[in-house]
Amino acid sequence: MTQTGDDDATPVQPLIQLAGVGKSFGTNVVLSSIDFDVRPGEVHALCGENGAGKSTCLGLLYGLHQPSSGQIFRDGRATRIESASHAQDLGIGCVFQELSLAGALSVAENIYAGRAPTRLGVVDWPELRRRAEALLAEFGLDIDVSCPVESLPISSRQIVEIAKALSLNSRILLLDEPTSALAPDEVDALFEVLRGLTRKGIGIVYVSHHMAEIFRISDRISVLRDGRHISTVPVSETSQDQVVADMIGGAHPGDVSRAKEGIGDEVLRVRSLTHSDQFADISFSIKAGEIVGMAGLMGARRSEIVRSIVGLMPGATGEIAIHGASVQFSSLRQAMQAD
């Protein structure tokens, strides 16, 4: 974790700052009097429940929205960030959760889209590949940069998206759920890269719902709730329970304890559910009064499994039983009419 100035030290001028910023879309007030800043060489986590205003803050910092009130300061100067391209010119890079890569283009072409090195007026392909390989090597990712992005697994595409932002030589990097599609070893590689960036004085805004990651990589944490700034504290001076309490507006409820008496008979049984090359041998059951979670990285086929169960993806084999009776749904309506 990179150490930055604290309240007792000489103040560090932020790389970028939201000062009393509000944002409304029509009559809908999304943000109100937000104060937030990013210092050189720090990872500043932005936390909050869905709808708290995190994405809108990123949009303001990246020029996708304009403040309805307040000001944005860049290196201490009031600045109007007109657009995403203007933000990039100001040294601000952003990676949103939704990937924006062109699947048919190669990895190298995606990373340096519109900025490919040229020689005698034409693209210098060897140099383009060399630069892309060097950048991806920082992630420990050894892939053919000439292959189309659409041929890569989701996790590798996410890293390519981050590498694309880093290729802009950004001084400020905005990351929206950057690890949502990454395996643990890929998260480790990403964090090593982020630490290397902060050692160069780059400031990072880190948005994530994963508290363990936030406390592992961040220097400061700011919490938003209902579009308002609730707290900003050094990570060393708070706890996961306190951050969650700030997010939800009350004491952390802790682990939910449920009485076994509330669990009834089996209502759904899935056995050996298989769908060509989508998934294979999926088995689980759900009892009355029970909540069963289905977890996995992006691309793990969770949605496809559920769609197959309720008849939205025909062609699956295996057994589906409701209250012990085998069923085979051919449509969502039929599934909804089931007991």
Image (cartoon, rainbow, N blue to C red):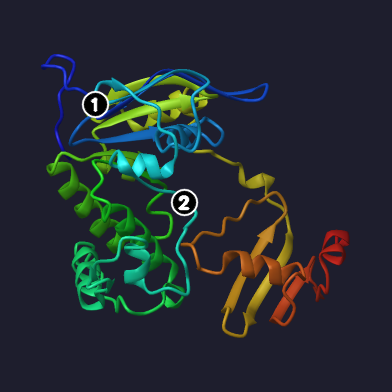
Evaluate whether residue 207 shows in this view.
Answer: no
Query: Residue 97's mark?
Result: 2
Up-down: is 329 above or below 184?
below
**Looking at the image, is mark 1 or mark 2 nearer the viewer?**
1
Q: State which quadrant residue 268 falls in.
A: bottom right
Mark 1: few/some/many CA within 10 Å (<14, 14-19, 20+): few
**Which residue is at a point 11% across and 16% down the rendered structure image?**
10
Q: State which quadrant residue 156 falls in.
A: bottom left
Q: Is residue 24 left or right of residue 307?
A: left
Up-down: is 105 above or below 4?
below
Q: Which element type, helix, strand or loop, lies under badge 2?
A: loop
Residue 229 percent coordinates (x, y) = 44, 20
Query: Residue 132's mark?
Result: none
Q: Residue furthest front?
A: 120
Q: CA distance from mark 1 to mark 2?
A: 27 Å
Residue 310 percent coordinates (x, y) = 75, 67
Mark 2: few/some/many CA within 10 Å (<14, 14-19, 20+): some
Residue 108 percent coordinates (x, y) = 31, 70
Q: Is residue 328 left or right of residue 246?
A: right
Q: Is residue 288 left or right of residue 238?
A: right
Q: Which element type, helix, strand or loop, lies under badge 1?
A: loop
**Which residue is at a point 21% across and 67% down the rendered structure image?**
131
**Amino acid identity at mark 1:** Asp
Query: Residue 75's mark?
Result: 1
**Amino acid identity at mark 2:** Gln
Quarter in which the N terminus is drawn: top left
Report the front residue among 259 and 122. 122
Report the front residue among 96 and 284. 96
Q: State which quadrant residue 62 falls in.
A: top left
Up-down: is 44 above or below 225?
below
